[in-house]
Image (cartoon, helix red, strand yellow):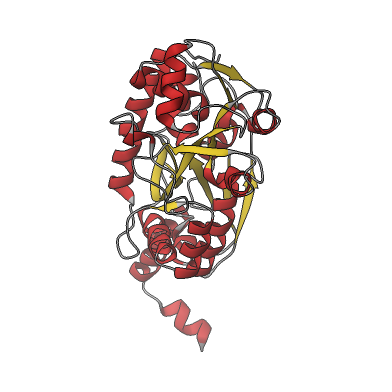
Amino acid sequence: MFAASFTAMSRRTLCTGALLTAGLTAMPGAFAQGNYPSRPIVMIVPQAAGGTNDIVGRVVSQKLADKLGGSAVVDNRPGAGGNIGTQAVARAPKDGYTLLMTISSSQAINPALYKAPGFDPVADFQPVSLVGAVPNVLLAHPSFSARTVPELLALAKSRPGELQYASAGNGTLNHLLGEMLNQMAGVELRHVPYKGVAPALNDVLGGQLPLLFGSLPSTLSHIKADRLRALAVSSAQRSPVLPDVPALGEFVPGYSGTLWIGLFAPAGVPRDVMERLRDGMRQAMADKEMRDKLEAQGVELAGTPDKPVMGAEFAAILKQDIAKWARIVKASGATIN
């Protein structure tokens, strides 16, 4: 009877079925998008394991996966100041299964610092959600004579070019924070670049150099153990984690330089997948457990639990920072081929 019914089917019905089948074949992502995520999401972190972005990425990836009802893995792709991992996401399939958890130094500074970073920070990506900001801390070895920012600035003005500060390398955020201080405070701290933050931090801990800008999560244990003295945080306001440490802007009006951390998808990911991702991040950013974990690491979370910073608002912050850091990079003369 089934065969007879099939034979009796009108030619018009057959044609309609064929067209529908052809339409679904032409849209291979149709079912995948409806079930997104149907396989693990890969969150690429373009920095090494153990750093600030890696710490944040691992916390956020698991909570995002929970909210989406899927799973996620973190894939560290360090190299070239973050360019290698960022390029990988820009070139990844546009299906929402490869995401970028990155920091402002890679996304907003590298385009001005590198002659050919290998990606366009705006055209190649869609912002999902800003997670938060991490202030750097202006740190001094305990033996350093200046114990406050006014004492440091007075000493630097009396000895131009003599006081040294370490950084993770030319063009890194902790290099440019020192350059911004030089420009805005009218001093001349001398930059000493290292090949990475670990050797720079080790030499300041050992007293070989007196000063360093270091991210709060990576240096908090040294501050609490009195191995380093915190002179000021680089953010516009004091950090809740170090409420007794002043902000540099209290002494140098307008000074503000934080490391923000945010989640991006490649440009071209379908709208419905982007909506799922943003909804998942909206729920994650409201989750108290995740917020507590990140705040304990010194992350100043973006927005509020019921109003995170997403989409166009995050895109505007990125564009502002690209312009800001381009000016500072140009004034510093830093460039990397």
**Residue at image location 48% in from the left, 11% down from the top:** 159
**Residue 221 image offset from top left, x and y in percent:** 62, 49
Residue that extends furthest to the bottom in the rendered view of this protein: 1
Nearer to me, 31 or 293: 293
**Residue 141 image offset from top left, x and y in percent:** 61, 32
**Residue 257 image offset from top left, x and y in percent:** 40, 34
Q: Is residue 54 visible?
A: yes
Q: Is residue 37 visible?
A: no
Q: Quadrant of residue 187?
A: top left
**Residue at image location 40% in from the left, 14% down from the top:** 330
**Above or below: residue 25 compared with residue 69:** above
Nearer to me, 210 or 181: 210
**Residue 237 image offset from top left, x and y in percent:** 34, 44
Nearer to me, 98 or 101: 101
**Above or below: residue 238 compared with residue 154:** below
Nearer to me, 298 or 335: 298
Quadrant where the C terminus sits is top right
**Above or below: residue 19 compared with residue 138:** below
